[in-house]
Amino acid sequence: VKDLGKFFQPKSIAIVGVSSKTTGLGGMSYLVRYLDAGFPGRIYPVNPRGGEIVGLKTYASLSSLPEVPDLTTICVPAGSVPGVLEECGRLGARHIHLLTSGFGEIGTEEGRKLDGRIAAAAREHRLLIMGPNGMGPYCPSARLTAWGAIPGRDGPVGIVSQSGGITQRLTEWLCSLGVGVSKAASIGNATVLDVNDCLEFLAADPSTRVIGIYLESVREGRRLLDLARQVNREKPVLLLRGGETQAGAATAASHTGSMAGEQRVWRAFYRQTGLVHTRSIAEWMDAILAFTLLPAPAGGGVFIVGGGGGTSVVHGDICVGEGLHVPSLSAPSMAKLRPVVPVAGSIAGNPLDYWAIYSDPACLGAVLQIAYADPRVHMIIVDRMIPRKAFHMPLDMPDPTPGTIELMRTNGQRKPTVFLVDSDGGDVGLAEAGAAMRAQFCDAGVPAYPSFDRAARALAHLYRHQSHLTKTGAPS
Amino acid sequence: VKDLGKFFQPKSIAIVGVSSKTTGLGGMSYLVRYLDAGFPGRIYPVNPRGGEIVGLKTYASLSSLPEVPDLTTICVPAGSVPGVLEECGRLGARHIHLLTSGFGEIGTEEGRKLDGRIAAAAREHRLLIMGPNGMGPYCPSARLTAWGAIPGRDGPVGIVSQSGGITQRLTEWLCSLGVGVSKAASIGNATVLDVNDCLEFLAADPSTRVIGIYLESVREGRRLLDLARQVNREKPVLLLRGGETQAGAATAASHTGSMAGEQRVWRAFYRQTGLVHTRSIAEWMDAILAFTLLPAPAGGGVFIVGGGGGTSVVHGDICVGEGLHVPSLSAPSMAKLRPVVPVAGSIAGNPLDYWAIYSDPACLGAVLQIAYADPRVHMIIVDRMIPRKAFHMPLDMPDPTPGTIELMRTNGQRKPTVFLVDSDGGDVGLAEAGAAMRAQFCDAGVPAYPSFDRAARALAHLYRHQSHLTKTGAPS
């Protein structure tokens, strides 16, 4: 395992290439954000002109710093990078984040040559280089957060990604939903440190429980296979792979200079490793939420609660389409439901459709108790409608959300249970109310999704992952 | 074609069964909403107790009204319905909406018998009955809007649906996005008037251009096949079918008392009719938006604009997964792009990734002109990022949305072009800003979607529909 610790918990940072430009991505934006986040260590801006920047003394070169920095962030133009790396090598600065782009990914001979010089410098001086063309390390617990909500939120999710934009998006999302990030590594072209190095590090990191990877290229496929298979048994690994299709692969080539492998090879990869295979950023995020907050399900039977008549029918179809099933409830469950759910205008069964589920947490509680006791039910999706005039709802009814969240806390996820808060529909107020309600649930540790499809798909990932572990003889 | 006109443009309405209860679905809620919407005709509440309700004289029975009502809405309990239908028959009131539930859908012998008596009364007196267990007719141009935004919005979309909740949802959604509804029929159990009757009526209705159907049961499958095949050539028909899977079908049985047909039969149905096959309410709505606002594409080649590096890669993969393709641009297009898009930090090609696309409508305009001239490009998806701090954006930059909308108006959808406004991410302010921006685009006649998957899927439906028409020798 390569020692990447100083990337995420540095005591001192040098930022090489801080111009006075205050907008856009660059040394200045890193400097300002580290200060905003309250980074407690020492920060050294490096700029040949000297003087002061945002109240900090700047240094003409790395060699003139009072110490060897734990982390060196390089933001100078591509052509100047090899010289700075030589200086790092001489001084013994080993942990280097290379933000600069304009290397192999631009597809020119010049770009490829520069990539080669970076790799050579790393070998010669034993440098650990994250990048180029990457956003680098992110660690809220160390207040090392150069993007997203400042100062970010500490949590159990570790991230390795070849896209800066996707890394930012995911960290921001996880923080907004109250889940939080242990460590993120935006590794760009992965010229030196690659996905394997970071995966190995996160596997050994005690603050990381779930791992998300965005990948465009792999140098050592066999090592990734072995590593992923092993890590995935201890910590779920969720993969979003860019370049799955030829169209994507061509783009990946001009994004990080890599060519994606063959479909066939990847199918075998997923089968052998049991890695969670997601296909969009939202699907990836949804699944991470489920793996972070829910226990493993004992099977693929889903109980669908609420939703209305026609909607319940569609929900059942969607579950089956995702590889789950919607079992009939057991005879004892049906007997217990009878006094709880009336006959006309409702559906007592699975799916269950009854108006009071929305408005009365006690009624939902009674239904959940029945589901917890039913051996055919392994997971539960509850539709949480947002009160609105269009649905003949009394808008002045008491808000059932706090009571529902309290109910979920008391029940403590006895079977994986998620909520659907669907605020789609073009109405701005509804969109806002829905996002707020989902955030309330997620913040309380209960996954809430904006569409039934997404809820069902997240649970399907959870179920398939558990099935893989069981089939291959997991410890749990 | 059955004459359903009076359902949607009645001059007088009797509401039988108006209690003084002001909440919940029932005669009172219909009465109040028709008044709120400014329904210009005569409304007669019927209640054996007489007196006044919300300022209107009530009548003890249908027989005591001063005229035979064009539309009779029946809200009395199921057991009393046959008696009211007899009275309708005697008086010659032929257009009847039966809101009451508790018939075949509850699965009892008693419920099935009542259904039989409704069908018998319809045959005997030549009654046109919409329901039971349905929300009935909806027509914004006639101010006949008993649900959703009041008074609703007139537009080109006609709806037939076996779910009241889904009908409400879709009408509300279409109105919020500025598209609007011509006529909607929530037909519930479809005991008398069924999908075929309504489809035939909408096909002949000059104010309807696009037709959405939610279906759980079909009595005359052969007639639906012939009708759908013929109508779909003139007006796109988009079908969401509840009960596609066994789980859904079992629920459909208890929702509207119907059993869904076999998968095999339905696959042949879609192949022969070319109907647009959607699988969730959002997918159905997204496609309706595309069919309503966009011209037919000449092929399946998508140009992807904006999105960032990694995201562009994933977007390409998603297009291919939806059955579209992401062509390389032609050599002349690439030559024209060179002066517009810089090399480092951007991707000039397809997908195209360049920061100025977000901030500068003139730059987007230059890129669109290139795409319009490129014969390989048939459809365009533009990523419209919402300015936010997390992405190193200057938050004080001028809002590019009005300029972008003006650009789209000028270009007049020369090739089907949609926008992606992805506000997912758990942040409440972002959710609100995204919904507002999407509504702005849609209101200006430009479809805007909340995720790339959904944008790509809507365009894929448009492309497949056009392919079907071309293959089967369409007039256009």
Image (cartoon, coloured by chain):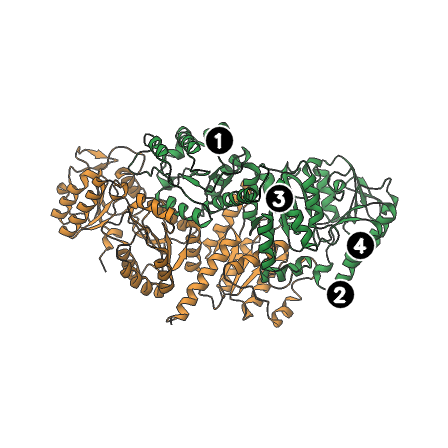
Chain colours: A orange, B green
Q: Earlier in the sequence, mark 4 or mark 1?
A: 4
Q: Are discs 3 and 4 located on one and the same chain?
A: yes
Which disc number belongs to residue B81?
4
In this view, the mark in front (1 or 3): 3
> How far is the residue under mark 2 from the one under mark 4?
17 Å
Q: Are discs 2 and 4 located on one and the same chain?
A: yes
Q: Quadrant of residue A330?
A: bottom right
Which element is circle 2 on?
helix
Count every numbered label the image shows and give the total.
4
Chain letter of the residue beneath label 1 in the structure image: B
Q: Are discs 4 and 1 located on one and the same chain?
A: yes
**Where does the image place residue A34, in percent across and percent down from the top left?**
29, 43
Q: Earlier in the sequence, mark 1 or mark 2?
A: 2
Image quarter (top left, top right, bottom left or bottom right) of the C terminus of chain A = bottom left
Q: What amino acid type should be assigned to the residue bearing mark 2?
A: Glu
> How far is the residue under mark 3 from the one under mark 4?
37 Å
A90 on left or right of A220: left
Q: Earlier in the sequence, mark 2 or mark 3?
A: 2
Image quarter (top left, top right, bottom left or bottom right) of the N terminus of chain A = bottom left
Q: Which residue is mark 2?
A: B109
Q: Which residue is mark 3?
A: B232
Q: Which residue is mark 1?
A: B408
> Callout 4: 10 Å neighbours few (<14), some, many (20+)?
some
